[in-house]
Image (spheres, helix red, strand yellow):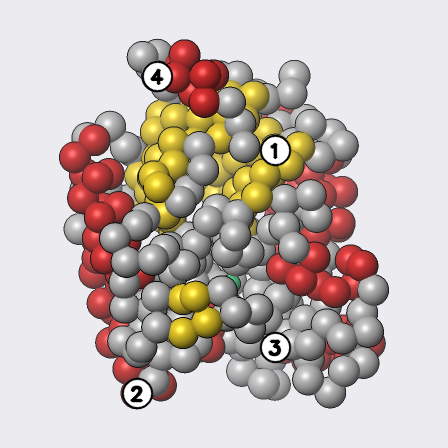
Amino acid sequence: MGSANGLMGYRGKQPLLSFGVISDVQYADIPDGRSFLGVPRYYRHSILVLQRAVQKWNNSQKLKFTVNFGDIVDGFCPKDQSLSSVEKVVREFEIFNGPVYHMIGNHCLYNLPRDKLLPLLKISTLDGRAYYDFSPVPEIRFVVLDGYDISVIGWPQEHPNSIEALKFLREKNPNSEKNSPENLIGLERRFLMFNGAVGKEQLEWLDSVLQDATKSKQKVVVCCHLPLDPGASSKEALLWNYDEVMDVIHRYNCVKVCLAGHDHKGGHSIDSHGVHHRVLEAALECPPGTDAFGHVDVFHDRLLLFGTDRMESTEMIFTP
Ligand SMILES: [Zn+2]
């Protein structure tokens, strides 16, 4: 994944900015377990991975901010501990000497509804929306998408977004267990309850942000808990309407990299328009004593991800 030589060659050069990354901490005070596919999960160890990440980010003293790609507490967390567990993980993030940009994942929403979760993550948007953008240096814009905008998890049952999601799932997934991809073929396997979609309003907002970024000659990094390219992710982990989101992104030439979490094994691809997609390896699946986090150096012409341990380092050279 990427070339180590390229990474080393750039090591001494001054980036425009650097930021930390971590994904899928999925902490819970419960014994170790396994995923549906049998991959070991270390629920108590994952918060130690986060602690070591924050320590390393603080020691480096060059990171402008850090990004959490979602799923900070696992769905198996006992429900009477949901609030305290989310608060505990947020407190660990707050030890970082700088801003932390969070995004929500399905596991966060199994624990707390949006109206409780967003204030804890300091996502201060209108009406429970969790998408936003920021520009830490004039040349670069970050767009954080809300992949659970249209979702059956997180919204009150009677919320229009919840109703729309349920209708969509019933149409696309005939199984009575809506988290089962049984009999779904190829890319249809993404139509599962633990995924979601970007709604119409958010798509319009994305279009306007990319239009503005293009005018301002900014390069854009898109962040979303759910992956946006089948080349970098399992089919079962993709955003329901990744194709619609990518259609908007491909109308412009400003988006150079899309970063995601959710598909724990990680991945990297370059799509048909030259946009890099990098799905980050999960902190949850690090056996005790190992890590998965990193930092990214942003240059005019590339992003360099320096991963620790199980997070692979990746060089992402921008397509002109
Ligand atoms: Zn997830």
Q: Are marks 1 and 3 in contact (CB under 8 Å)?
A: no
Instruction: Of the two numbered discs 3 and 4 on the same chain, state the one appearing first in sequence.
Output: 4
Disc 2 marks a residue whose amino acid type is Asp
Does label 4 or label 1 sit earlier along the sequence?
A: 4
State yes or no: Cβ of the residue under disc 1 lies below 8 Å from any atom of ligand 1.
Answer: no
Mark 1 vs mark 3: in front: 1
Q: Name the residue under label 4.
A: 11
Q: Where is residue 255 in the image (x, y as percent from the top left)?
A: 61, 32
Instruction: Kindly identify the residue that appears in the image at 21 percent across and 31 percent down.
Output: 60
Q: In this view, does 59 lie to the left or right of 255?
A: left
Q: Mark 1 points at which residue?
A: 276
Q: Do the residues labelled 4 and 1 touch (CB within 8 Å)?
A: no
Query: Which residue bears the numbered disc 2?
Result: 80
The quarter holding residue 97 reads top left
- Closer to the eye: label 4 or 1: 4
Type of amino acid under label 3: Val
Per the model, the C-alpha gap separating discs 3 and 2 is: 22 Å
| Sequence-first disc among 1 and 3 | 3
Is 136 situated above or below 110?
A: above
Task: Name the one closer to the observer, 76 or 133.
Answer: 76
Q: How far apart are marks 2 and 1 (CA)?
A: 40 Å
Quadrant into which the C terminus falls: top right
Q: Where is residue 289 in the image (x, y as percent from the top left)?
A: 25, 53
**Badge 4 density bin: few <14, some 14–19, many ≥20, Cα 10 Å:** few
Q: Position of residue 317 (x, y in %)?
A: 56, 21
Q: Mark 3 points at which residue?
A: 152
Local SS, label 2: helix
Q: Which of marks 3 and 2 is nearer the N terminus?
A: 2
Residue at mark 1 to residue at mark 3: CA–CA distance: 29 Å
